[in-house]
Image (tube, rainbow, N blue to C red):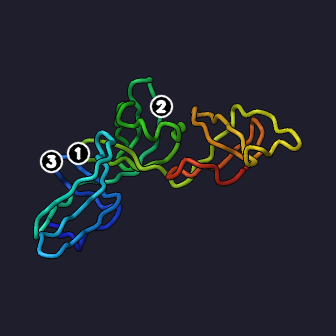
Amino acid sequence: MSINFSDLSKGMVIELDNAPWQILDYERHKMQQRAPVTRIKMKNLINGTVVERAFQQYHTSFSRAQIENRPAQYLYTDSRYYYFLDLENFEQYEISKETLNSVLGYLKEQMNVEVIFYKNNPITVNLPTHVDLKVVETPPAFRGDTASGGGKPATLETGLKVNVPMFVVSGSIIRVDTRTGTYTERVS
């Protein structure tokens, strides 16, 4: 299926150079007496690279990538592969650590995610918008210690490091936004 520039939207997945690319941002410039230039910032869903490409044609068209999102549950890791259980047909899928590099700090065992398939092969996962993680280590807060803006670093149970407010202590469970990697609120 052919997609014109006017049909593009952020988050859409197109196929380019035999790989699925998710559109992060796009714009089109038309200068006087020149062909329009279409600039697209996109992320390769297989290896995670982000590139910006320009297309200089009057009729730029793309094809939509044949991807499928399936609900799954993260089971375990053997330090090289991460294993997921399809919640519809109960098949297990493995995805390499290198492929999931950007989402590893948010994955907890028994967490529900969406596995993205491209040409019937699992390539990556979609995380929920927010995840609840336990604070493993954070320095204590002292009265008057707000010279750094009222925050302090914290290490979470998955190894992810985020800045948290001074009142958060080790053992607290906090909610983290997976899109930005920032603290949103204390859960308990």
Could you classify mark 1 by the number of other residues whose Cα lies within 10 Å: few (under 14), some (14-19), or many (20 or more)? few
Q: Are marks 3 and 2 in contact (CB under 8 Å)?
A: no
From the image, state whether disc 3 or disc 2 is nearer to you. 3
The residue located at (33%, 42%) in the rendering is 48
Q: In which quadrant of the rendered view does residue 32 lie?
A: bottom left
The residue located at (40%, 51%) in the rendering is 71
Disc 3 or 1, which lies upstream in sequence?
Answer: 3
Residue type at tag 1: Asn
Q: Residue furthest right?
A: 143
The residue located at (45%, 28%) in the rendering is 77
Disc 3 or 2, which lies upstream in sequence?
Answer: 3
Residue 58's spot in the image, x, y percent?
Answer: 10, 70
From the image, state whether disc 3 or disc 1 is nearer to you. 3
Mark 3, secondary structure of its residue: loop
Could you classify mark 3 by the number of other residues whose Cα lies within 10 Å: few (under 14), some (14-19), or many (20 or more)? few
Q: Which residue is mark 3?
A: 17
Residue 95's spot in the image, x, y percent?
Answer: 35, 34
Q: Which residue is mark 2?
A: 76
